[in-house]
Image (cartoon, grey):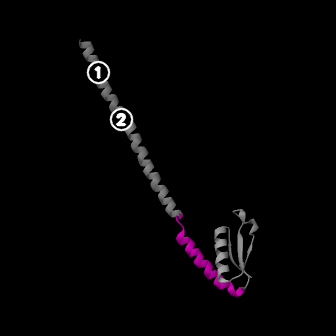
Amino acid sequence: MRRVLTTTDRSLVESLRVSLAAEGIEVVITNDAASGLPFIPVTVTVVDDADYERARALLHRLERRLRASAPWTARQRRAWRRAILAILALAVLAYVGKLVSWPVAVGRTDLTRRASRRAVLIGS
């Protein structure tokens, strides 16, 4: 008996088990009952040592497929988060800039109108 894989990734263990069973390779899975907890590793062991190399090759093909089909990598998620945060920051800065400059412009107009009204009222 030789160990092929030890991982906490339950989906990888099940995918490997099904793939090995389809190839006719007998396996023993240990810590399977405790694998409901995310931090307890599960071990996949090949019963016949002659099947070890085939099992490892199948595992590598399976891992390659799983990586290729992964929708987002950590780097891609980080890049998208940064882009969204940059856009939000620019939007907030533009909004705050309008709030700061708008009352000043409106205030000057109101002061000019009030001053001209006072001049008209005082002059009459």
- In the image, 68 versus 92, the foreground residue is 68
On the image, which quarter does residue 59 sit in? bottom right
Residue 41 location in percent, x, y? 71, 68
Residue 95 location in percent, x, y? 40, 42
Magenta-colored span? 49-73
On the image, which quarter does residue 2 sit in? bottom right
Residue 9 location in percent, x, y? 65, 68
Q: Name the residue under label 2.
A: 102
For image coordinates 67% across by 68% down, the residue present is 10
For image coordinates 41% across by 40% down, the residue present is 96
- Magenta stretch encompasses residue 4: no
| Residue 96 falls left or right of residue 18 | left
Residue 5 visible in the snapshot = yes
| Residue 60 falls left or right of residue 28 | left
Question: Which residue lies most toward the front here?
Answer: 22
Q: Which amino acid does label 2 sit on?
A: Trp
Disc on the earlier residue, 2 or 1: 2
- Magenta stretch encompasses residue 63: yes
| Quarter of the figure that contains the N terminus | bottom right
For image coordinates 37% across by 39% down, the residue present is 98
Q: Is mark 2 on a helix, strand or loop?
A: helix
Q: Mark 1 points at which residue?
A: 115
Q: Is residue 37 above or below residue 119?
A: below
Q: Which amino acid does label 1 sit on?
A: Ala
Q: In this view, does 67 lie above or below 80?
A: below
Magenta segment main secondary structure:
helix
| Residue 67 falls left or right of residue 91 | right
